[in-house]
Amino acid sequence: MRRPTITTWIKFSLVLLCAALLLLGSSSPRVEAQPEANPNAGYVGNEACAKCHADLYKTFVQTPMANSSGLVNDDKLQAALADTQFVHPNSTVQYQVSKDGADTFIAYERHGAFQGRRKLDFFIGSGNHGRSFLSAVEGFLYQSPVSYYAKDRKWEMSPGYEMMDTMKLGRAIRKGCLECHASRLQPITGTENQYAAQPFLDRGISCERCHGPGEQHIKLMKAGSKTTGITNPTKLPALQRDSVCAQCHLSGEARIEKPGRSLLTFRPGDALSDHVLSFLSTSTKSAELKATGHVEKLWQSKCKSSSGAKLSCTTCHNPHESQPKAKAADYFNLKCASCHQDNACKEDIKLRTNASNNCIACHMPKSPTEHIGHNVFTNHAIPRRANGAKTAPTTELSLAAFWGQATTRDLGLAYLAAASRTKDTNYLRATDLLKKAEPTLKNDAYALTALAKMYEREKNNEAATRCYELALQADPAQTEAAVNLGTLYARQSKLTEAVQLWEDVLKRNPAYEIARINLAVAHLENGNFETARKTLLKALEYDPDLPMVRKLLADLKAMQK
């Protein structure tokens, strides 16, 4: 049998990268903007708030928001640690979650091909709908492939993992993955997914996520000042008031961060659109629900259009406490009755006089969500009929910013995000818009990376190289730009420069598969067989089921016989 040559490896690697570029080009874009030097400046934490607001704090810490992240070893998890063994049909990997002393682990194996286990360190999700889990590997956070779903009381594959035919342990948890589940994040600047030993200082959504930094407030109160120095969202203008909830409950078809901004730079009292723009379709109103689409659905409702700025999330929801299920119907009935008299309901009288007498059961029905199985969420569009017609999936979108003004750059990135779910028409729109915006993108690392991928797809490698280099000048932590620029350098026989880029990427995220494969191939090109082998084996430490890595290890073994 003919043994693979180094040249074959190099060609193989470049083909792999071309495929990866197409994949990356269609993924939902996310601006990894550099946060301020200390994103937690002025924040004091929930415990400081509790000293003066004990009654509010006592009820708030029982809410799902306050419990949307934490340590896995939290006692609330224990009841779910039963019947955790299952086989994922697509990958044939068997999983089991179990305790070992004080720690919780996920064990995995596939027909003897590989086996192992990984500690589950943190959870995200309140547990009302479910929980996903994070593992810290040398300080870098990765998502577990299994999650717990409360509705069905079962352990299953995490969202996005269901259709995979391999096990994936190397999905990086970036800042954007945590922003709406935890507070006072502690990311390590310049890395993709490395954090301090405690990635977040407050579990869940903290008091200060809605009220702003508390340090100045405490100082003023101690000094007897009449100025509070804290934000009361209900007293803000409508846009700023609604922005507080929209931080985490407005998703849209695409969500694009403004250059240099993110949710980490947002402060209560700001307009969210100065930091993050959400784009909605103006061509259709989808009847499908999103897990974080409550705000956009409410804006579709007749209640909101009729009430205008008077109606907000807090009209019906008290963020400081949750309603017990037994009392929820009566509580929300009163909220509805504050605008609707009893005789306003035109539904079947049998429904109105039913013992449940439940407005939201008819007009805010629970339905499955997009992309997340085993879950249902409340429909905040408040439809006239519970079984209203659903729109067909759209392939072409006309996008507009929900709030704020979108630049050509913003709109281009929004269409790029939409292109991951629809036809190439949206990709072509994105390309055209980002090319027009290019003169304004000098220090915009993410947009430059997106544009570079578009040029590379068009085989305009000169323009792609220029944009990647500019992106890395603006932000050396743009790992995607570094990986792809390294590939272009390798094609130009600038292997030393390529290796430097790939090694830098692995310092920022050691589980970056493509960077590690390319680095191994580069070592082979230089005749460093043992270094190449160690590089590939290191990849399996982070992600044991990488078919391409296993194939290359087998090829290397054959080459050395």
Image (tube, rainbow, N blue to C red):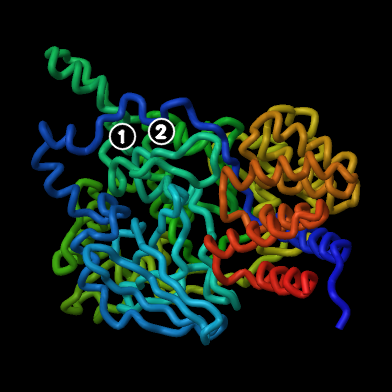
Asked whether the viewer can see residue 507, the reply is yes
Q: Is residue 426 visible?
A: no
For image coordinates 30% across by 49% down, the residue present is 204
Numbered circle sitting on residue 258? none
Q: Quadrant of residue 346?
A: bottom left
The answer to whether 523 appears left or right of 281 in the picture is right
**Which SS class for mark 2?**
helix
Q: Quadrant of the C terminus?
A: bottom right
Q: Earlier in the sequence, mark 1 or mark 2?
A: 1
Left or right: 277 as drawn, with respect to 298:
right
Q: Is residue 523 left or right of residue 57?
A: right
Q: Nearer the viewer, residue 548 or 303?
A: 548
Mark 1: amino acid = Pro
Q: Residue 117: x percent and y percent?
A: 41, 70
- Residue denoted by label 2: 240
> What percent of the width, then of the height, locates residue 173?
48, 52
Q: Residue furthest front?
A: 561
In the rendering, at what x and y percent does residue 343 appear?
25, 65
Relative to 141, is 263 above or below? above
- Name the one closer to the observer, 287 or 528: 528
* Residue picked out by circle 1: 233
Residue in the picture at 62% in, 69% down: 546
Exactly how many numbered labels are in the figure? 2
- Residue occupying image coordinates x 36% and y 57%: 124
Does 240 appear above or below 338? above
Residue type highlighted by circle 2 = Gln
Mark 1–mark 2 contact, CB under 8 Å? yes
Measured as percent of width and height from the top left, residue 24 is found at 70, 56
Quick check: 135 left or right of 335? right
Which quadrant is the N terminus positioned in?
bottom right
Tell me the CA gap for discs 1 and 2: 8 Å
